[in-house]
Image (tube, helix red, strand yellow):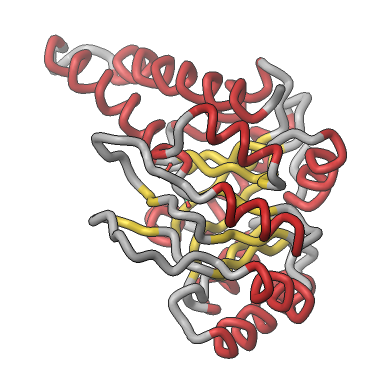
Amino acid sequence: MYCTMKPLLAQAMEDGQGVPAFNIHALEVVPVMAKAADAVKCPVILQVSVSTAKYIGYSLLASIVKKVSEDMTVDVALHLDHATDLEDIRGALDGGFSSVMYDGSKLPFEENVANTLKAVELARNAGASIEAELGIVGRGKIIETYPYTEPEDAAEFVRRTGIDALAVGIGTHHGMYKAKTNIRLDILKKIHEAVDIPLVLHGGTGVRDDDVRECVRLGMHKLNFGTELNVSWVRKAKEVFAEAEPDDTMRNLMIECNQAMTETIQKKIQLVRF
Ligand code: 13P
């Protein structure tokens, strides 16, 4: 069933489990992701960056995810990832997304609170769930000194905004690097003690398998994986397309790439459900 991420995260919190959130990079993979999760009976959040959402079109993407969800035995949510502009949140909600993220993490605390409150109002009016971020998740170059989330700030942020899930900075980075990230589980533990809503792991690709499990134990109930799925698809595509003839059916070429992504998805699901 198509739903918001709120009941999925509430159930996961009760069961001490995680809900995986997979980044859609192209329309082709929407049914692939949903079926991969359905096959192992795992509720799933399909999420999309603002640029990919605009490339596909908000309402086209939402209608397809809704339609695909009808055939699934598990719940499926569609979530806008890292929106920094309230207009994009409006666009996604008008298009039929069931969930959004407002990311004001680069703003001063008070400005982040003020904008997040506006995003919360938009989401509530549309009956959608909302995630926000405090503390930075890195991208590109790995930085040594890091703006980790302060546990007391996290508690105040959650109390003042009324969000459904909080993304926190514990040293993760978006993307794929030669080495896995050293994350600060000690800081996560303190945030978990201070905050009573589900926390969100960003940059799941760079996190060691054992650390992903520990993050679930320490209150992270939404776990984001993006780059590694894209990498598994493209890696297989390089192999398959290199050997293909121009009149080969695209469908058959893509089936192999979709299968490679399915395997990565199911490995990630095993990490968050135990
Ligand atoms: P990765 O691409 O590093 O897995 O991160 C995904 C993510 O956190 C999306 O917001």
Quadrant where the C terminus sits is top right
112 over 58 or under it: above or below: below
Residue pictured at 22% horizontal, 14% vertical: 240
Left or right side of 181 for 16: right
Residue 248, picture quadrant: top left
Q: Position of residue 249 (x, y in %)?
A: 28, 15
| Residue at 50 percent of width and 86 percent of height | 108
Disc tally is 0
Residue 43 can be seen in this image: yes
Residue 113 versus residue 97: which sits nearer the camera?
113
Foreground residue, 196 or 243? Answer: 196
Q: Residue at x 49, y 63 (%)?
A: 82
Q: Is residue 211 above or below residue 133?
A: above
x and y percentages locating residue 193 in the rendered image? 76, 57
Q: Position of residue 21 (x, y in %)?
A: 58, 41
Q: Can you give x and y, in whole percent of width and height, for residue 22 in the image?
A: 53, 39
Say left or right for 162 vs 182: right
Q: Indicate the quadrant containing the N terminus: top left, top right, bottom left or bottom right.
A: top right
Residue at figure coordinates x 78%, y 43% from the top left: 8
**Residue 197 in the image: above or below residue 2:** below
In the rendered image of this protein, does residue 149 appear above or below residue 269? below
For this view, does 238 lie left or right of residue 13? left
Nearest the camera: 222 or 157? 157
Tell me if residue 26 can be seen: no
